Image: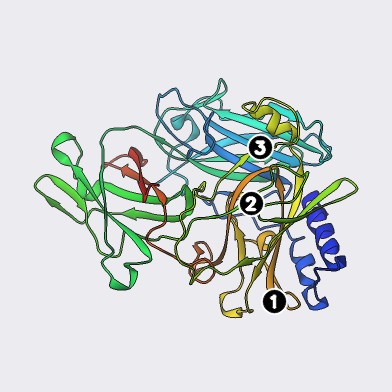
Amino acid sequence: MNLRSLLVFVSILLFACSPTKGISAADESLVTSTLLKSDPPKIGVGEVIDPDILSVQFGIAGLLLADPIVELGGAAQIELAFDVLGEDIREFRYDLTHCDKNWEPSQLNSVDYLVNFSEGDIREFSLAFNTVSKYTHYNLSLPNQFISWKVSGNYLLNIYDDRNGELAMRLRFCVTEQMVNLDVNQTRPGSVQRDKTHQEFDVGLDLSQSRIENPRRTLTLSIIQNGDWRTGIYDVEPRFVRDDILLWDYQNKLTFPAHREWRTLDNRTLRSAGGRIEEIRREDDLFFIYLVPDLVRVDFPFETRIDLNGKFIIENFDNPGGIDDQRNFDLQSEYTTALFALKMRRDESIEPLYLYGGLTNYQMNELNEGKYNSVLNAYMFSTPVKQGFYNYAYVSTGSDGFRPVWEHTEGNTFQTENTYSFLLYYRPYGERYDRLISYSTTQVNRF
């Protein structure tokens, strides 16, 4: 049993023994389901496979809330930060895979897209200190002296456990060459039924300012909501040309469920309960936090709430150190096992339900799946989290088993603040890979 599964297991036992909280014998499957290791993902799907890897942040160096998209030849670096629970120091190595616009491996060999070496070791790591929790914190910046890239496009960062060579983590990032600029306009959804629940876009490109070969055949557009690759609309061809303007002007195609503002968990202090935390308990070397049960928000009125669009920051108010010293936060923050409850009648038609967001690495698997507690009339979820400020949501999944669905548990409202990324790919005739020639972001309903 890995350490993450042990934390979840103990939290469930404590929950069962609590005089104010209980779990029925029929819900014992919650224990066994959390012990399962997720299956390795398909190629191109960003996933954390090793269950002992937690608190994964992947963005721009110094700006880990920013999406991992950098300009070819630019000064910005992509940074990966993560923890591995346990006392053992583990070694990891990594390599990069260049992909096409659909996140399948491209036709290029590594010598065609990499400079220097084709793989490297993660050499920057430190042990936690002044904490009850035992873990090792790792950092990796790219490009570095060992590996850098020489073409634009989609990339997979593959992290391997050096003990057995197994894939531990696979994450997506992009390298862009800004050849052109897109004109993005939000528009009302073409369907009346989506007018209050969705956000839609029209996109244009001025061809008079660019030299693009046969643009209607060689350009495709992808759009991502809030940096979550599961939400993407991929590989959209232009619809037509009007007065030298290439247009992606569709009805009900570049359309996204707007979701709601994310729920928040603030466990930056473990000295007292407060906010959404109802109780904090310590059992030997383990901390447990119990959140106030959540309610389904489908019929709630819209509420303005500043959030991180699903991401999280690592901070703590309990250990001394400079408030701006992120290294202190990374190495001196405790891990707790958080227990969540979503109060609602059981609805097997929308199961399984998942605890979703950066705190669960945007995964929908057995580790993050809720089980129904008939005593509390609630779906129960449990996951280890480091001290910090987190966003989360409860979601089901669509027929593809990949996209998060908010409509049954959280609801969708057009007033929600969201950030969208627009990625334009170019593949002229005879080329062996898709160049990423434009990247831009648009924020909807900025507060």
Q: Amino acid at mark 1?
A: Asn
At 40% from the left and 28% from the top, the residue drawn is 72
Q: Earlier in the sequence, mark 2 or mark 1?
A: 2
Q: Quadrant of residue 240?
A: bottom left
Provide the secondary structure element on which disc 3 rests.
Answer: loop
Q: Which residue position holds label 3?
A: 315
- Give the CA distance from mark 2 to mark 1: 22 Å
Give the position of the N terminus as an image quadrant: bottom right
Q: Amino acid at mark 3?
A: Glu
306 and 198: which one is in front?
306
Q: Which residue position holds label 2?
A: 265
Q: Earlier in the sequence, mark 2 or mark 3?
A: 2
Q: Which residue position holds label 1?
A: 377
- Give the CA distance from mark 3 to mark 1: 33 Å
Q: Quadrant of residue 93?
A: top right
Mark 3 vs 1: CB contact within 8 A:
no
Q: Earlier in the sequence, mark 3 or mark 1?
A: 3
Q: Where in the figure is residue 322, as x and y percent of width and height?
A: 67, 25
Q: Where in the figure is residue 75, as x and y percent of width and height?
A: 44, 22
Q: Is residue 385 above or below residue 147?
A: below
